[in-house]
Amino acid sequence: MTRDFQKQAITLIDDLKGVCANYGLGNDGNEFKIITQIFLYKFLNDKFAHEIKQIDPKLAKAPSWEDALRKTKKADYEMLLLQLGGGTARLRPEHFLASLYARQNEPDFAKTLDATLLSIAALNSDIFSVMTDDGEKQPLFDAITEFVSSKRNDFARALVNKLVNFSFERLFAEKFDFFATLFEYLIKDYNKDGGGKYAEYYTPHAVAKIMASCLVTREVKNVTCYDPSAGSGTLLMNLAHAIGEEKCSIYSQDISQKSSSLLRLNLILNKLVHSIPNIIQGNTILHPYHRDDRGALRKFDYIVSNPPFKLDFSDFRDELDTKANHERFFAGIPKVTPKARDKMAIYSLFLQHIIYSLGKKGKAAVVVPTGFITAQAGIDKGIRQHLVEHRMLAGVVSMPSNIFATTGTNVSILFLDATNQGDIVLIDASNLGTKVKDGKNQKTLLSTAEEDQIIRVFNAREAVEDFSVVVSYEEIAAKNYSLSAGQYFDVKVEHVAITPKQFENELATRTGRLKSLFGESRKLDLQVEKQLATLAVSPAKGRDRSPQRSGE
């Protein structure tokens, strides 16, 4: 049954994309807004229907729950709305999908659809609005038909007609849980590396699973989870699922308005509406938003992040180099490289910000370029040294190449634990996985068994030959703070079993060869001596042969 509903939901998404393509919006920059928002409208309408019927069972028995609600007295209607759960949008009768469907032949139906969406957004702004770092609210819905240059009424009708053939209500009633998968499918065409210099990269499921499973190893409650470069929220969702959605609060910040909108959708689909007020659109490095009651940057229980690695931040680099930021960026701020500004290592700023934002008992998992774990000098080494000296390390998992299909950069997962005073586990998983083609790119896929192997070894702090090693802070310091597992593996010496007679013969052969080489070397030495003896070297008269002093 779950599979049937999932198939129907995916068909709905495909149908909506087909409508956009038919009206000239296929692969258009605004297509993702239309698809995600009209899908979300459908989802919220069906969830409202499910919840309101639970509050008033008579509505479930009515021939039309919409008609029954329209006849409800205003005071009674308001009382019903007050009883809705925090994750359910409040709707008026004119907002219902049935109401829109009934009005589709009216003139200016496109304006009716847009007005409906905007009205829902205004009515629910306190619950569903995303804030910017300067306090501006980003509403739940925009006017979506304005992106079509002509035939807007036909376009609006086509969208609405696709929504009436399928209902999510039974999914809510039977508590099916495939919305994470559904979200991935919904945004798969809108979360790729084509969005300019702040392009969002979708974190592979394997990486997200490993991060969450190695961070959450015991039951916790009332914890805070943070991602300073959240994107569409894959890492946060996996972390919340591992903890329990009702046991955690999500906090995030991302410079991309698109990413923040997708994260909001992700939270709605995954029972985390209570965290939407904590979703901030803004520049984390320049204007970190989340602060405590004293105005200091907030400290978090769990932090996950896959920050951008290389990015031009030269336009605000000087603003970072202040006394107030020196404690946050304790290892330094990368300098501007005029000829390669797009290669400025912004990940080192995110990583320092994460370390600074970690609570006294906090844990974190961060995707970093593998080069970070062995850099011999500079900011990278300074960060690793800080982690060792402050005893904040849990371990590192070096992932296979091409685990991200969109970048050839090798990556590792850096795990932090502010309470870990003991051993650190370093894993070299670079030889795991299967290479597959992903469009024009190649990527590496880990099997479930391989993912579980990494998680088990990490959490057990187990040393496995040529795969993992368990080391101390002191051993890491002695290795110039290297976090590469390979540098700690035992050196293996191959032994070949031979008899004493075979050994004598081999030794005689090698000794004879060595004597022969020595003889040839002596002959060459004599030839060189003879050649030198024939040379007459006489310095020119009057020439000063003393070396010049520096500066002369």
Image (cartoon, rainbow, N blue to C red):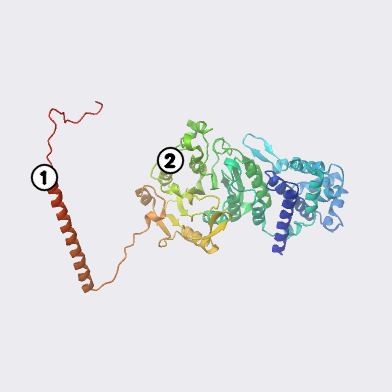
Q: Which mark is residue 533?
A: 1
Residue drawn at (21%, 29%) of the image = 548
| Amino acid tagged 1 | Ala
Q: Nearer the viewer, residue 503 or 327?
A: 503
Residue 65 location (% of width, % of height): 84, 54
Q: What residue type is labelled 2?
A: Ile
Q: In this view, does 535 lie to the left or right of 243?
A: left
Name the residue that disc number 2 marks: 379
Residue 100: x percent and y percent? Answer: 83, 48
Q: Where is residue 273 in the image (x, y as percent from the top left)?
A: 67, 48
- Callout 2: helix, strand or loop? helix
Q: In this view, does 469 lie above or below 23?
A: below
Residue 16 percent coordinates (x, y): 74, 52
Residue at point 75%, 48% (across, down):
41
The residues tagged by marks 2 and 1 sit, at their Cα atoms, a distance apart of 57 Å
**Whether residue 52 is situated above or below residue 229 in the rendered picture:** below
The N terminus: image quadrant: bottom right
Q: Can residue 88 be seen in this view?
A: no
Nearest the viewer among 114 and 419 is 114
Looking at the image, residue 6 sits to the left or right of residue 391; the answer is right
For the C terminus, the image quarter is: top left
The disc label shown at residue 143, or none: none
Residues packed near mark 1 inside 10 Å, few (<14), some (14 to 19) or many (20 plus): few
Closer to the chain start, of discs 2 and 1, is 2
